[in-house]
Amino acid sequence: MALAPRLNDRGGRASANEGNIIDQGVVWEAFTRQAPKMLVSRMQDHIVETSDGALHMAINLGPERGLTLFTSIDNGASWDVTGHFDDFHTLGSSDLRLVEGEDELMIVYTNDTNGITTATLDYDEADASWTVEDTSVVVARGIDAETTNPTIIEGGQGRTLVAYNVSGEDGVRGVIAIETEDGHWLKIDGFDPTVTAGALRVLPTEDGFGGIYANENELFWVTFEDGAWVYEKIADQGPLGIYATHFSTTTVGNDIFLVTVSDDNRIQFLHYDAETKAWTDAATPSLALSDKATSVQMSADSHGNIYITYDDYDDGTLVVLKSEDEGTTWEQEAVLDVPGFFELAPVRWFETPEHFDDELYVAYQFYFPFLDGFKGPNGLYYFVVDTDPDSESAAPARTAAAGSEIHALADAHAVPEDLSLL
C-alpha cells in the first residue's frame, strides 16, 4: 500500500458518524511533537479502565515528554498526568494491564539502556492517582528497543510474566520471562529461523499462560509443556506490519478472542474456547467482507459482549462491530468519521481498551504529512461510543459544536497556516 497522504471525496459534507457517539474531539493534553509511536504496537495495550470508571492510558509522547500515564475521570473529556517513566526509550514501546479484581496496574516498557523494565502501581480512587510500588529490570541491555515489543500479564498462578521478541537476520527468538519469588526472572525461549521478524504476546490461561506468536506467514498458539515449547498453528496467514504486530486480543472469562489484519487487508477473527482448549478457524465477519483494513482492535464489555474496531481504509472511517454470541454473529455498533484535517496520514494508528464497562473509548493518532510528518505536531483524536444507552453509567453527550474551531478547520480543508489556531 503506497504511503502517500490520504485523500478522500468527503469534502465539507456532514460527518459520516453513525451510532450512539456521545463525545469526540482532540486530546489536547497529549498534543506533542516528534512522537511517531504514541500508540505502538497494535498487539500491545495502552488503555485500561479501573473499577471506578476512570480511564488510564500510557502514551509515548516522544523525546520531549517520554512515556506518560494519563488519567480521566470524565469519560476521556479531559486528562491529568498521573505518571511518568523517566528511563523509557523514546523510540520504544509499552504494554499495560490491570491485575484482575484489583485496581493495581502492571506496565512493561523498553528502557533507555536497551533493556526491559516492569513497574507495579497502586491506585487511589479518592484522588485518581497512581503510586509506583515496585520496579524490576527484566533485561538490563542488549535488545533493540525500536523493534522489541514487550507484553505483560499476571499468569494463572499469580506470577508476573513478560513476553518479548528478539528479531534478527538469523531468525526470531521469542522469550517469556517469569518472575520468581526472589524477584529474579526465569527466561524460556523458542527460536524461529524461517523469518527475520515476528511478535509475541503472552496471555493468561486457566493452566497458567500461553502466547500468540505471529510472523509474516503464520500465526501460532504457543504453550510450554514438559520443558519444551509447543507450537500450534492457528492461521495460515500472518498479520500485517513490519514485525507482524497488527493483531489484538481480549478475554471473557478464560476464553480468548483474537483478531488480525492479514497481508491481503482482510480481518481474521479467532476464538479460543478454554473448556475445549481449541481454536476456531480464522473467519472474516460478514459485515467486513468487502472492506479493506490496515489496523484492528479487540475489546470486551462487562456483559461479555465483544467488539472489533477496524479502519475501512477506502471509506476513511473507523467501524465498530459488536457480537453478543462470542463472534458467531456481528452487528454494526458505530461508524466513526475522523475529521478530514486529522486523517491525512497514510497509515492509521488507533486503540481501544481490552476491557471496558459501557462506554467504548477509541483513541486515534494523527500527524500532518505536509508538516515534516512525524517530526511535526502529533496528537490523539478520540471518540466515546455508548454501547449500553440504558445503563446508569452513560455519560451525557458532549460533542464539539459545529461552529467550533476544530470543525471549522476540518470543513475548510485546513492548510499549514491554520495550525496557529491549534
Image (cartoon, grey):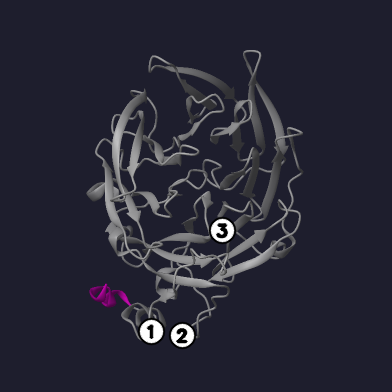
Earlier sequence position, callout 1 versus callout 2? 2
Mark 3 surroundings: few (<14), some (14-19) or many (≥20) residues within 10 A: few
Q: Would you say the residues marked 3 and 1 are in contact, meaning their CB atoms lie under 8 Å apart?
A: no
**Between 412 and 94, the one nearer to me in the picture:** 94
Residue identifier under label 1: 412
- Please check the rendered image and state whether residue 421 is part of the magenta-colored stretch, yes or no: yes
Which residue corresponds to the image point at 28% horizontal and 56% vertical from the top-left? 80
- Residue matched to label 2: 12
Q: Disc 2 marks which amino acid?
A: Gly
Q: Which region is colored magenta?
A: 415-422
Q: Secondary structure at mark 2?
A: loop
> Whole-Å distance between the Cαs marked 1 and 2?
7 Å
Indicate the secondary structure of the residue bearing disc 3.
loop
- 279 left or right of 312? right
Q: Is residue 37 at all visible to an observer of this figure? A: no
In the depicted view, which residue is nearer to us: 330 or 268? Answer: 330
User: In the image, residue 256 lies at what x, y percent?
Assistant: 64, 41
Q: Residue at x 28, y 58 (%)?
A: 32
Please tell me which of labels 2 and 3 falls first in the chain.
3
Cβ atoms at labels 1 and 2 below 8 Å apart: yes
Magenta span: chief secondary structure: helix
